[in-house]
Amino acid sequence: MGNLNNCLLRKSACKEMGKDLDAIDQMFLSSRVKRCVMMMKTSTFLRFAVDNCRDEAARQWFGRNSESFSQLTDVYLFLKKRIDEEEAKNHSSNVHIVLVSHGETRDSMIPASCLLPLSNITDVLLESPRTHWTSVRKAGDQMIPNIVLRPLKPSENIETHSQPGRNCIIIPFILPGQSRDRVPLSVVTLGLALVLLSSRFKATVRLCACLTEASAGQRLHGEGDVFSRRWTNVLKHFMVKHRPRVCL
């Protein structure tokens, strides 16, 4: 009963934070004032995530890398709008969310568990056209390459081999306005986890992205960790430039 009450309190708190953000987003504030308020809300979101994340390695990483989450509020607002639209559709409570984006790797490694910040994201799968899915959940807190997403342009086409069916949600990663900022995948999955707290969904996230070459590919080659090597091999298949495709 205690765990249930705690869960309900967490969901209630996150709903209230979401309502505050919606109100702020609708206000006619100057961009400077609005940005200051958003930064304070980002700090609140991050503290909430640290307090409620069950994985110690992820909690420590979030605490040490808070400066990496400056875009968390913007990502949250973008994803909340999309998930709110899907709530009205005939999905069950367990869905697959396909993130379609450009991206790259960075010269750093992160604990895999950082991509699973809360229990409502059950797994993150890296979709590769030449290999089986690579599961973050199976990696635990092993180190994996740090993936950074680059938003699609509004004019870019998304190729699908079939229409998404029930329990499948496709989200082209297109941030509002003209934003072309790079966003760490860890920020996107945390933003999504916070959004899902106020929804009925639990999600498996599938990343569908073409990743540009980065020095990380060479640096990671030959790393001793088996899972990290497998991720590096999968990433090599993504080091191509093409229009994002969604394979359903």
Image (spheres, rainbow, N blue to C red):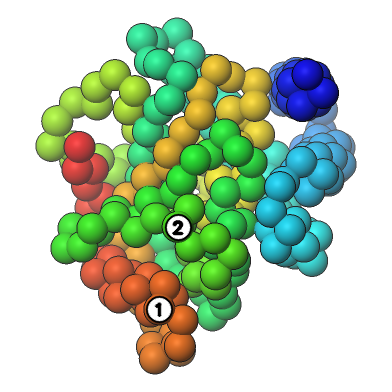
Q: CA distance from mark 2 to mark 1?
A: 12 Å
User: Which residue occupies 49% across, 40% down?
Assistant: 122
Point out the tag, 2 or 1, that comes first from the N-terminus. 2
User: Which residue occupies 23% across, 43% down?
Assistant: 246
Q: Nearer the viewer, residue 147 or 115?
A: 115
User: Which residue occupies 72% across, 46% down?
Assistant: 53
Which of the numbered marks, if any, corresponds to residue 83? none
Which of the numbered marks, if any, corresponds to residue 138? 2
What percent of the width, then of the height, locates residue 113?
58, 57
Q: How many marks?
A: 2
What percent of the width, then of the height, locates residue 237?
24, 69
Q: Secondary structure at mark 1?
A: helix
- Looking at the rendering, which quadrant does residue 89 occupy? top left
Q: Nearer the viewer, residue 117 or 152?
A: 117
Label 2: how many Cα within 10 Å (few below 14, some 14–19, many 20+)? few
Q: Is residue 38 visible?
A: yes
The residue type indicated by label 2 comes to Lys
* Residue at the extreme front of the image, as rendered: 1
What percent of the width, then of the height, locates residue 214?
42, 79
Q: Quadrant of the N terminus?
A: top right
Label 1: how many Cα within 10 Å (few below 14, some 14–19, many 20+)? few
Q: According to the image, label 1 marks what residue?
A: 226
The residue type indicated by label 1 comes to Val
Q: Is residue 128 above or below residue 229?
A: above
